[in-house]
Image (tube, helix red, strand yellow):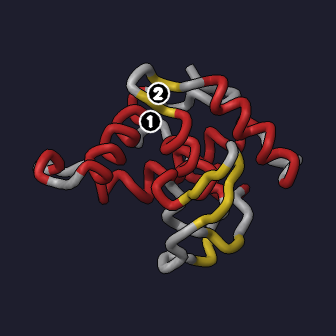
Amino acid sequence: MNHLDFTLFQLCTHGWTHWDLHLDNVLFQDDHVSAILDFDRERYVYPELDVARVVLSGCIDENGLNKAKLDSFFKGYQEWFPSFELKDLGRALQLLWIVEAPWWIKTDIEKCSVVPQRFFLEIEWLQKNWGIFNENSQ
């Protein structure tokens, strides 16, 4: 938190956000998205949060960042939103950490079901790799 520049978030675009866009809420058929489920948390905030959540949910595994999956997702996303750049992903991931860390970082996470435990591991990975997509990362 000491290294977080909150002015970065002034660059975020406002828009409708699913607010719960992890892979358990995405259905696939023949390697294509066939449906997105669970819109009960939809909000008008920052669509970048959905990008960050799906990257954490779909591109991070036990070996860390799966660059092939990230490249594939990012290529497809840029077809619809060409102005979204890798540095924007870094900002989005940091914003997601601010939103989700209080939900998943807790002392009794091991008592929770598998999904919250997975989210905890994703947030923990993000903490350990803070700034990975930022231009000025150390």
- The residue positioned 72% from the left and 56% from the top of the image is 11
Query: Up-down: is 52 above or below 2?
Result: below
**Contact flag, marks 2 and 1 (Cβ < 8 Å):** yes
Which of 2/84 is in front? 84
Few, some or many C-alpha atoms within 10 Å of disc 2 (few <14, some 14-19, many ≥20)?
A: few
Q: Amino acid at mark 1?
A: Leu
Residue 132 appears at what percent x and percent y?
57, 27
User: In the picture provided, is 6 more to the left or to the right than 11?
Assistant: left
In three-dimensional space, the C-alpha distance between marks 2 and 1, rounded to whole angstroms, equals: 5 Å
Q: Amino acid at mark 2?
A: Asn
**Rendered image quadrant of residue 72:** top right
Query: Up-down: is 66 above or below 124?
Result: above
The residue indicated by pointer 2 is 129
**Rendered image quadrant of residue 123:** top left
Q: Residue furthest front?
A: 30
Query: Up-down: is 41 above or below 69?
Result: below
Residue 60 appears at what percent x and percent y?
48, 32
Callout 2: SS? loop
Which of 106/121 is in front? 121
Residue 84 appears at what percent x and percent y?
79, 47
**Rendered image quadrant of residue 90:** top right
Residue 49 is at least partly visible in this image: no
The residue indicated by pointer 1 is 126
Few, some or many C-alpha atoms within 10 Å of disc 1 (few <14, some 14-19, many ≥20)?
A: many
